[in-house]
Amino acid sequence: MTPSRTITVTLADNGHHYRLHEGDHLHITLSGPSYAIWAEPTSTSQAVLERTGGSSGAVATATFLAVAKGVVDVTATSYLICPSVCAGPSLPVFKVSVTVVG
């Protein structure tokens, strides 16, 4: 049996694809730009990639456990800190795809 591993992903990895084995962990940390607050990252299928912890804010995090074979997306959106006052450039959206194998 292969020991489980943890893959760490940041905003710089936006758009990438990852291959995990069942039992592996995916840890995501998102921060920046300074005018944005991040929602907690989510998986399109908790049956494949289960979120085991996380938070939202200027720095958002999430930890996932690969629990079953399948393909999922992990996404997070951001929103303005001061929506009624400031107008910044377009807000970032985060998305990575994950394939879980046995």
Image: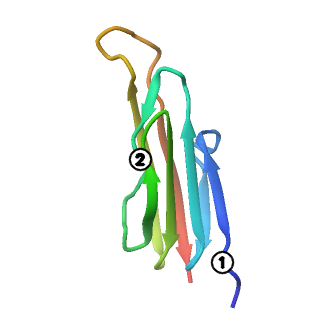
Q: In which quadrant of the rendered view does residue 33 lie?
A: top right
Measured as percent of width and height from the top left, residue 19 is found at 61, 67
Label placed on residue 40: 2
Farthest residue, direction bottom: 1
> Which corner quadrant of the image does residue 25 belong to?
bottom right
Q: Residue at x 53, y 22 (%)?
A: 34
Q: Which mark is residue 95?
A: none
Residue tagged 1: 4
The residue depicted at 70 percent of the width and 85 percent of the height is 2
Query: What amino acid type should be assigned to the residue bearing mark 2?
Result: Glu
Residue 6 figure quarter: bottom right
What's under tag 1, amino acid-wise?
A: Ser
In the picture, which quadrant includes the C terminus?
bottom right
Identify the residue at image location x=37%, y=68%: 46
Query: What colour scheme governs how the chains and residues are painted in the rendered image of this protein?
Result: rainbow
Picture layout, residue 98 above or below residue 84: below
Disc on the earlier residue, 2 or 1: 1
Residue lying farthest left?
84
Residue at the image point whose x is 43% and y is 72% from the top: 48
Left or right position of 69 against 84: right
Residue 65 higher or lower than 77, as above or below: below
Instruction: Quarter of the image for the N terminus: give it.
Output: bottom right
Provide residue 92's location: percent of width, then percent of height. 48, 30
Q: Secondary structure at mark 2?
A: loop
Residue 84: % across, % down:
29, 12
Q: Residues within 10 Å of mark 1 (few under 14, many from 20)?
A: few
Element under disc 1: loop
